[in-house]
Image (spheres, rainbow, N blue to C red):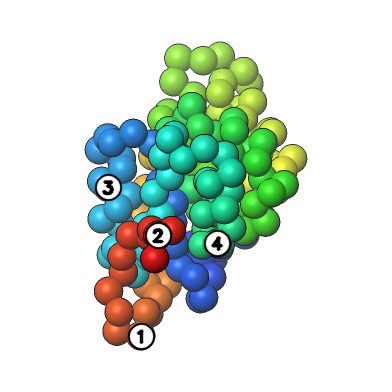
């Protein structure tokens, strides 16, 4: 598998957030803008077809989501060829037995689907340790924005 920092293509540079409002949503949004990434927001009210359309239109390689959305995203992977990484906003191991945690079980399934699965904490640790290797990208002078499927 590729390191997380190398999966954001030079073309469409975006990251998707799929969760209710919470601190991790804002942290992800601010970090995305620091790296010239467009933020794509998914909401429960969009439905599966609209979410699939948006993810394929934006070619989003990374989704930061609450843990309740992770299983469905893994299940949808065969319809989302650009998806490479899912970052769970929630701890994947807290309070669970080793080898039987949400992270262990979802991680095996994600790997079978060709995905990498990280907790939010692991994602932050990766960014801190690899900040010099993650491209900040360029939008030819344009300011990064939040994606909308509406014209």
Q: What residue is disc 2 on?
A: 150
Q: Position of residue 107 (x, y in %)?
A: 62, 34
**Badge 4 or badge 1: first in the primary sequence:** 4
Front-lying residue, 37 or 106: 37
Secondary structure of residue under mark 1 = loop
Front-lying residue, 57 or 1: 57
Crowding around mark 1 (Cα neighbors within 10 Å: few <14, some 14 to 19, many 20+) is few
Q: Position of residue 149 (x, y in %)?
A: 43, 58
Q: What residue is disc 1 on?
A: 140
Question: Quick one: quadrant of the C terminus?
Answer: bottom left
Q: Nearer the viewer, mark 4 or mark 1?
A: 4
**Badge 4 or badge 2: first in the primary sequence:** 4
Alpha carbons under labels 4 and 3: distance apart: 24 Å
Q: Position of residue 59 (x, y in %)?
A: 56, 62
**Badge 3 or badge 2: first in the primary sequence:** 3
Q: Nearer the viewer, mark 4 or mark 3?
A: 4
Q: Position of residue 13 (x, y in %)?
A: 45, 68
Q: What residue is disc 3 on?
A: 27
Q: Contact, CB < 8 Å: mark 4 with mark 1? A: no
């Amino acid at each position: 598998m590729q390191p997380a920092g190398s999966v954001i293509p030079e073309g469409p540079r975006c990251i998707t957030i799929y969760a209710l409002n919470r601190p991790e949503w804002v942290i992800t949004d601010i970090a995305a803008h620091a790296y010239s990434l467009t933020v794509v927001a998914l909401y429960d009210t969009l439905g599966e077809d609209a979410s699939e359309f948006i993810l394929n239109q934006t070619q989003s390689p990374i989704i930061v989501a609450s843990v309740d959305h992770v299983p469905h995203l893994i299940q949808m992977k065969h319809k989302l060829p650009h998806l490479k990484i899912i970052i769970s906003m929630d701890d994947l191991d807290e309070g669970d037995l080793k080898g039987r945690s949400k992270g262990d079980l979802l991680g095996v399934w994600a790997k079978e689907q060709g995905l990498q699965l990280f907790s939010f904490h692991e994602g932050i640790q990766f960014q801190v340790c690899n900040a010099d290797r993650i491209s900040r990208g360029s939008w030819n002078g344009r300011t990064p924005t939040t994606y909308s499927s509406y014209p």
